[in-house]
Image: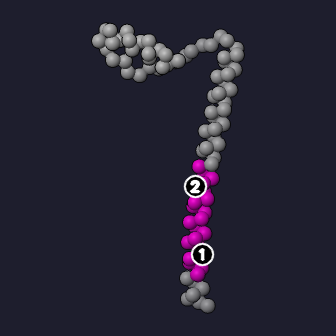
Amino acid sequence: MSQTVRTEVSLKSQEWGYKLGSVYIRKVHFRDKGMISQIEEKVVNRLRQVTSAIKQDGANQVNIIASKAEKEAATEFARAAAVHP
């Protein structure tokens, strides 16, 4: 929607000697129930994707930290075993 507005308004603003910057559309009220449902569904799906990505990133970071800690612990245990058989 903002791209359509930008395209149409840019032509007029250029005629007036201005260059259009950002276009923000706020507080849009839809009356079509089907359109509202589609938008809600898309938003919910996107939130699920973002939540899943955040969870996966967190799990990856935990795995990296745990692997590093296990490696350091194994190294220290090996060093200790070599000193005191």
The quadrant in which residue 28 appears is: top right
Residue in view at x 65 percent, y 10 percent: 31
Q: Secondary structure at mark 1?
A: helix
User: Where is mark 2, residue-wise?
Assistant: 61
The type of residue carrying mark 1 is Ala
Q: Secondary structure at mark 2?
A: helix
Residue in view at x 33 percent, y 12 percent: 14
Q: In the image as oriented, which residue stretches furthest toward the left?
A: 17
The answer to if 69 sits in the magenta stretch is yes
Question: For the image shown, how many numbered marks are present on the structure?
Answer: 2
Q: Position of residue 85 (x, y in %)?
A: 61, 91
User: Where is mark 1, residue-wise?
Assistant: 74
Range of magenta residues: 57-78
Q: Is residue 28 above or below residue 83?
A: above
Work out how far the residue at label 1 is from the one at label 2, CA to CA, in angstroms: 20 Å
- Mark 1 and mark 2 lie on one chain; the one further toward the N terminus is 2
The quadrant in which residue 48 appears is: top right
Q: Position of residue 16 (x, y in %)?
A: 31, 8
The answer to if 77 sits in the magenta stretch is yes
Badge 2: how crowded within 10 Å, few (<14), some, or many (20+)? few
The type of residue carrying mark 2 is Gln
